[in-house]
Amino acid sequence: MKSLVSRLRQPAPAWLRYFGWNTDHKVIGVQYLVTTFFFFLVGGALAMVVRTELLQPGVDVVNGTQYNRVMTNHGSLMIFLWVIPVLAGFGNYFVPLMIGARDMAFPRMNALSFWLIPPGGLLMIASFFAGAAEAGWTAYVPLSIRTPDGQTLWALGVIVLGTSSILGAVNFLTTIVTMRAPGMTLWRLPLFVWGIIATSLLVLSATPVLTAGLIMVALDRLVGTQFFAVAGGGDPVLWQNLFWFYSHPAVYIMILPGMGIISEVFPVFSRKPIFGYRMIALSSLAIAVLGLTVWAHHMFTSGMDPRLRIPYMVSSMVIAVPTGVKIFSWLATIWNGKLRFTTPMLFAMGFISQFLIGGLTGIFLAAIPVDLHVHDTYFVVAHLHFVLFGGSVSAIYAGLYYWYPKITGRMYDERLGQAHFWMNFIGMSLTYLPMFLAGLQGMPRRVADYDPNFLVPNQLASFGGFLLGISVLPFLYNAFVSLRSGKEAGGNPWRALTLEWQTSSPPPQHNFEQEPVITHGPYDYGEGHLAPHPAGAPAAGE
Amino acid sequence: MEYTKPMHEDAFRAGRALGLDHLKLGVWLFIGSEVMFFGGLIAAFLFYKVNNPTPESALLDVGLVGINTFVLLASSLTVVSALAAVGRGDVASMNLYLIATIVLGVAFLSGQAYEFVSLFRHGLTLSSSVFGSSFFTLTGFHGLHVLVGVAWALSTFFRGMRGNYTRDEHIGVEVFGLYWHFVDIVWIVLFTVIYLI
Amino acid sequence: MKERSILLVIFAALILTAGGYLAATQLHLMPFQASTRAVEVDRLFQLLLGITAVIFLLVEGALVYAALRFRRKPGDDTDAVPVHGNNALEILWTLIPAAIVVFVGIYSVQVLQDIERPQENTLVVEVIGRQFTWEFHYPEDNVTTSELHLPVGRPVLFQITAEDVIHSFWVPEFRAKRDATPGQMAELRITPSQPGRFPIRCAELCGPGHAGMISEVVVEDQAAYDAWLAAAKTGPSDPVEIFTQFGCAACHTLAAAGSNGQVGPPLDGLAATAANRVPGLSAEEYVRQSILEPGAHVVQPFANGLMPADFGQRLTDEQLDALIEFLLAN
């Protein structure tokens, strides 16, 4: 309460600090979350254009060139400016709080990581005025060498954003290794922190390789190097290797912290310890290590050595094992619990049910004979959206609702949150399920026009897509209005055991009034570590 | 949750107790990502070297570059000596060794510039062939890293002159040394991959 | 939970999964099977569908059951009974998926070896992708066409490449796809098993006309194939066929040829526009130059460099004359 009062007494322009250079990890975290959500809206608007064009066969709203630009930038914005950095935003705000640190290890580099994002995003959006990138987010050469100048801006934008991610990863790992509070042993780290560890290791290993590849593309375009010029002996498949060496691990970069968020939400709203804590933590590392060995499964149809395909198929399928361990452990966590269906809990359960579809269809794509039919079709589009929207974005929403009281000091509106969840869940299923059928039946991806045979699945997908677009409105309204009118949250409205809830909401400048000392695990519910519910205080989420 | 100890203003020092300074760990991690960056460029170079063998590689002058390699190795030695000097508290010697490092670094860059110019004269450029593209990109990015190292050495030198380093407090010199050795090791790999095999 | 309700849950789960497996393996989600390869790929697909349906139903079932069964009682603020893990259970749910993965992996490798095994008496067809058309070359008979004809029952080896950017040769009804990469020759084997006409689609984004890069494969009996081959040796002389086969239709709208491509300028009423476009050039000269040197007169807002510049080599003089006459007449 005290910090809340002192916060209100601060001079008015306190909010101004969110618009400038600031080294407080909590300010940077909010900067990340808000900026990336803006790019999510831009990417979503582009998706609406795509779904409008595909409402019926024929070229009606945008032509082939414009369609490719819209589709390319939809993918690039969602991946490089939304999912990857928004998870870094959560990491920024919560890793120091969860390990009992005062701030990140390198506060100024932290601010730099954030301030690289707006220029990266602007480069990408500015490319629309120079003939935007139109070779897909995969930017396959030689197509991406022949496209207009915007492609160069796109490549530079991705390099800048990759650099931001690398600096962030260095910062996270250093912070987690050197700045834990007394008693915060490795096996007492919250699972979100484990997710950030695994992701940061992947970023450090994979992102620089993409940077190297993008430099080759940019040099081919700008100074006429011959890396990917077939006439000069260049090889287009080299780019595919460099690109997927990063971009397959990128999927795990985008899902592992999300899985961490889910692992935070389930125990709190089941009032039970997480089931198989060590297995969940270790499976994140297993996925990260395996994730570096599977990239060529995106290239079964390109000219790779046929003998090399089998090991890549096997390693891709093996990833199903640690992923399954996580899903079964979450189910065991809620089993026999005392479940409370708050919005974050609903999104976490939605995560399991949607991500499961993404994971299971991944097995079809790993099985080479089937992949040779479904590769580069709408089957893949559906699969990747079940992983990245049903998986990552569900987890991000779960995190936004779960930590909203901590960040703002206010409760969000539960009814609006639940409406948002159901619109999102139904919209998702309606958008992406029909795409599996379209792909199996023969609809390639990235097309502005299609055979009338595919009309029904496309119309369903478009209506689902519009519902998804509208579903953002209750979220935005809720987030804005609850800032002022939400109930005061207090320090620990969910009665959670992890460290970020053991301080006021929002936390004071140095996070904790006293250095915390940790004496038990993060999810030891039912073991008597929690003070009884303070009399008279409202149970949150009712 | 128990709150027993007051929050120290110098809470960042907590890491020192583990024997791992956060600055040193950060530089190690960054070097790890740099290894992967060069890994990507080296992979491209080797890929083309194997798949598109080209007579242009005969233009390379192993003798000249061998001398240059020796210069860079010598600079690693001066960095080791600088660190040893400040470890004894001998800041004046450290500054001398840093100057030697800068001179050697600049000498290496000059040698590389000379090599590039003579290759240009023989018609090997960035855009003349895949060999030219991958050779200049790879060695050029290494050269850029040496340039950054020279700038870092200069700034370390000026800090040394201002008396920022003592026998017990010279983490800045240590992390500069880490980076410099890393750049050297990359060169040894490049020298082997490009000129020897 | 009481013992009876545990049995009930297990029984319901068994019914659900068995029913799900049977339903999934009977679902027809794939298109028509027009090759022997399609039969084998679909068998693997149905097996995967069955296995994943069981896992899907078990997990979603458990999720829904938990949501209904383990709801917190109103006013109950206490924690649940703490359970941190169960080694036997955790080992079990690591090993079972691992075993499934091994089984699926071995079976996939077998199918892969079957569908890619070289056959006797193989017909070789070279496939060349370019923005935004397919060209087929039959080296045995030295015939080049833009329509793919195959005799039913004879194994085919496609040798696939591209001239400009990466394309991907895909016939959904054959369950076969292979990238066409410039500077490389990729191989793809199938044996057509059913007569019919099936679409060929480009599956790799190749530029503005990617969606319209569609051709057709005609699978027919040997006699019909031989007759087509004999006719194809002379190349098309009908201007509409020339317009379609050389790829004009993929990019240009022309009512007389039934095309509605949007990549290049529309060609309806060309005689009138071409006559006045460039002073000193007659309509005939303007159209001829525009076909042979596409960069000579670029019409806004269409992009330069998209139209192939090699029609001078690919069209015979007779075909070129016939095409120009046709364009000016419509």
Image (cartoon, rainbow, N blue to C red):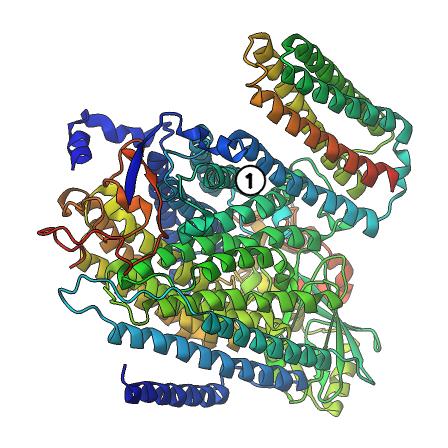
* Residue C117 on image: x %, y %: 76, 80
Q: Secondary structure at mark 1?
A: helix
Query: Label 1 marks which chain's residue?
Result: A
* Count of number-bearing discs: 1
Q: Quadrant of residue B89?
A: top right
Residue A78 visible from this viewpoint: no
Label 1 packing within 10 angstroms: few (<14), some (14-19), many (20+) = many
Between C197 and B72, the residue placed more toward the observer is B72
Q: Say above or below: A89 vs A450.
A: above
Q: State the residue at coordinates (12%, 53%).
A: A538
Q: Amino acid at mark 1?
A: Ile
Q: Is residue A117 left or right of residue C98?
A: left
- Which residue is disc 1 drawn over? A159
Q: State the residue at coordinates (75%, 86%).
A: C154
Q: Quadrant of residue A371?
A: bottom right
**Quick one: which residue is furthest to the left in this view?**
A536
Between A340 and A64, the residue placed more toward the observer is A340
Q: Is residue A231 left or right of residue C301?
A: right
Q: Say above or below: C53 vs A392.
A: below
* Residue A240 on image: x %, y %: 65, 54
Between C275 and A393, the residue placed more toward the observer is A393
Q: Quadrant of residue A442?
A: bottom right
* Residue A94 on image: x %, y %: 36, 43
Between A520 and A478, the residue placed more toward the observer is A520
Q: Say above or below: A190 vs A271.
A: above
Quadrant location of the N terminus of chain A?
Answer: top left
* Residue A422 on image: x %, y %: 26, 65
Q: State the residue at coordinates (57%, 61%).
A: C210
Quadrant location of the C terminus of chain A?
Answer: bottom left
Residue C52 visible from this viewpoint: yes
